Structure formats: structure tokens, C-alpha cells
Amino acid sequence: MPGRSALAILASAAFLLTLAGSALKNTFQVYFLPIAHSFGVSRSGLAWAATLFAVTTALASPLVGGIADRIGGARTLAVGTFLAGLAMIGCALSGQLWLFVVVYCLVAALAVTMLSYVPLGVFVDQLFQDGRKGLSYALITNGAAVGFVVLVPLWSWLGGRYSWQTVLEGIGVVFLVVLTPLSLVLARQSDRLTASKPAGGAEDRPGLQSLGARVRLCLRAAPLRRLALAFVGCGFTMAFIDVHFVPLMTDHHMGGTVSSSAVAVLGVFEIAGSLLAGWLCDRKLVKQVLVGAYAARCLAMLLVWAAPSQAGVMLFGIVFGLSYLASVIASSLWIAQVLPAEVRGTAMGLTWMVHALGVAGGSQLGAVLRDMTGSYQMIVLICAALTAGSALIILSLGSPFQASRAPQPTPEPVA
């Protein structure tokens, strides 16, 4: 078992990479309207980029999970860091909408998948074996939350002084020159401290050599299928935050100060909610946390539907923030409880694939309904209904600590 100081250093480095990786999404969020204007397209025209981005992350998630199972979470983060730098510079230099969409929806989408919850879940599962995985996972994944608090206001400030292309170029250089070397050090130290095969022992299980075998094993676990179905509601509401929240505030004549403040409030309470969720999950309250997260998400959507005012969006940020990572943490730890270690990355990837499809649906449907009705009210109500359904799905499940583990793999026939 690695020493606590070494674990703290590794966790801090992973946190920093996650914080930086959030720029792949929150820059698009902040610069959504300027990007659309620069290419001369409507909101729904640019929303296709967010939709295709989500589809790519959906397709990439099981693949990234399988990669993390085989090479380890830290090495996967290193590859994602390098790709993020290429994606940022590529988007900045694209010059044409079709090329921007290609770079953003292929390279950036793959990079963000390799810098987010799936490899981080494998990273935590491999390094933290002392029963505090929930709190450790919450701390590391809070990089995205800190991105809301620190990076979103920074992008808003920079956007008033430089073009979005210039900002993205600068971010890309930081990824390639500073963060990629850091990620390589993280990967080396992680391998040294675990002193085991990066894949977590999958090579010792011949039945799990292929990605197809891992996927089949995961799909045989009934709890995983229901967790993934419930995660659709999480995806739809994430799309609302990533794509439609800032434009909604613009529609209601709330300026950049209000927008950045509301997103920052969301980020602060995301941090608080995630730490509370991790602490409760470590006390085997995983189901209660997940039900509460979806219920809070439903309440938040109803709040912004009923009161699209400055006070209303601030209250929305508080309630939504408390639920933001709670659903991610509880779902990931539920998966770790009911699936074998060798396929947990693949299982998380499958779950995030469904989540990303929800993001794609929420992104495009929200834009289409906004253009058709002139309001975001309809998509807000749809998000509220979906998250209420997610809470009911989780209520129908038994405790993950009482469920039997997924069946063991059957050996693949040898040709």
C-alpha cells in the first residue's frame, strides 16, 4: 500500500489535470454565443457541435474504460492531456465551422473522455484501498467543480479582452508545454507505487482479454443496466448546464456578471455536495445519496422553470450544485461494489456512454425547442421529469452492499 504523502501528491496531480480538462467543456459553454456569431450560425446550428461532441464521448467511453482497465487510469490521463492540447489549438485555428466541428467533436471529445470520470474511477480504485474511495474520488473529481469557480470567470474576463480563438490557443500551449510532462510523471509514479500490472490483473483472466468479453460481462449485471438508464436524466440536465444555462440567462437579460456568478455558485456547492456525497458513500449510504441527488436535480430544474430571475438562478445553482457530482460518485461506487475489479473501467465507460447520449439529446432537443418556442421552458420541464424518473429507478434497486456480484466470465473458445 503506497504511503499517504505519495498518494496525496498523486491525487493532487490528478486533480490538476481534471481541473485543466474541464476547460474543454467550459470554454465552449462561455464562448457559445461568440463562436456561433463568428461562424454566422444560429444557436441550434452550433448546438450540433455539442450534440456530436456528446455522441463521440458516448462511443468513446466504453473504449476509454477498456483502455484504463488495461493500461491504468494514470496512463490514460496522460494520453488525454496531450490530446487536449492538440484539440484546443486545432479549434482555435480551424477558421471554418465544419473544421471546428471535426476537431471539437473528435479530438476534444476523446480528450475529455480520457480526462474525466471513467479513468479517474480506475485511478482511485487502483490506488486507494483503505475504504475511503468515496471521499478520495470526490476530492479528485472536484477539478471540474473548481473549473466552474475559477476558470469560468477567467474565460469571461479574457473573452472581454481577446477573441475566443486567442484564448483557446493559449490554453492549448499550456496543455502541451506544462501539463503533458506533468501527466507523464504522474503515470510513472502511479505505476511505481501500485507495483502491479496497470490493468489490475486482467491478463490473469483469459476470459477478459477482449473488450467484447468485458462488455458482455458488464451487461449481464442487472444493477448496471438500471444505473445506466437512470444516468440518462443526469446527462440531459448536464447538457442544460453545458449548453443552455448561460444563453437562458442572456434571454432573461442577465449580464455576464450574473452568469459567471451563478456558475461560480454552482461550482462552490458542487464541491460541498461532492465531499458530502463521498463521505456518506464511504458509510455505505450509496443508494440514499443517489436517490437524493436525482431528487435535488429535479427540484433545481423546477426552480429555474418557476423563477428565471437573478435570485432564482442563484438558488438553482445552489441546489443543482449540491447534486452535480453526487450522482457521479454514488453511481461509480455502486459499480465498484457489484462488478469485478478487472472490468470496472469498462462498466463505468458503458454507463457514461448512456450518460453522453442523454447529453446529446438534451443539447440538441433544448436548442430545437428554444428555436421553435422562443423559450427554454419546455426543455427545463423535460429535464425535471427525467430526473424524477431516475430517482424512481434507483428506489427500485436493492442496496449495492446486499447485491451479489456480477457473474464470472466464461472462458472464450480458443480457435
Image: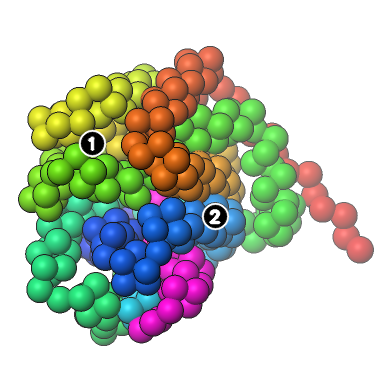
Q: Nearer the viewer, mark 2 or mark 1?
A: 2
Label 1 sits on a secondary structure element that is helix
Look at the picture and state if 297 lies above or below 117.
above
Quadrant that contains the C terminus: bottom right
Q: Quadrant of residue 164?
A: bottom left
- Horizontally, residue 374 falls left or right of residue 58, namely left
Q: Quadrant of residue 46?
A: bottom left
Residue at x 82% of width, y 53% of height: 412
Please state which of residues 335 and 322 is positioned toward the viewer in this rendering.
322
Residue at x 55% of width, y 43% of height: 354
- Horizontally, residue 28 falls left or right of residue 270, namely right
Please state which of residues 167 and 84 is positioned toward the viewer in this rendering.
167
- Neighbourhood count class around disc 1 (C-alpha, 10 Å): few under 14, some 14–19, many 20 upward: many
- What are the residue bounds of the magenta stretch? 93-117
Instruction: Give the spatial CA distance, label 2 vs label 1.
Output: 24 Å
Q: List x then y, in percent, for residue 298.
A: 35, 24
Residue at x 60% of width, y 25% of height: 404
Residue 387 visible in this rendered orientation of the protein: no
Count of picture labels: 2
Q: Earlier in the sequence, mark 2 or mark 1?
A: 2
Which numbered dot is residue 321? 1
- Horizontally, residue 279 falls left or right of residue 157, namely right
The residue tagged 2 is 55
- Neighbourhood count class around disc 2 (C-alpha, 10 Å): few under 14, some 14–19, many 20 upward: many
Q: List x then y, in percent, for residue 332.
A: 44, 39
* Magenta span includes 114: yes
Residue 310 visible in this rendered orientation of the protein: yes
Q: List x then y, in percent, for residue 74.
A: 40, 64
Residue type for callout 2: Val
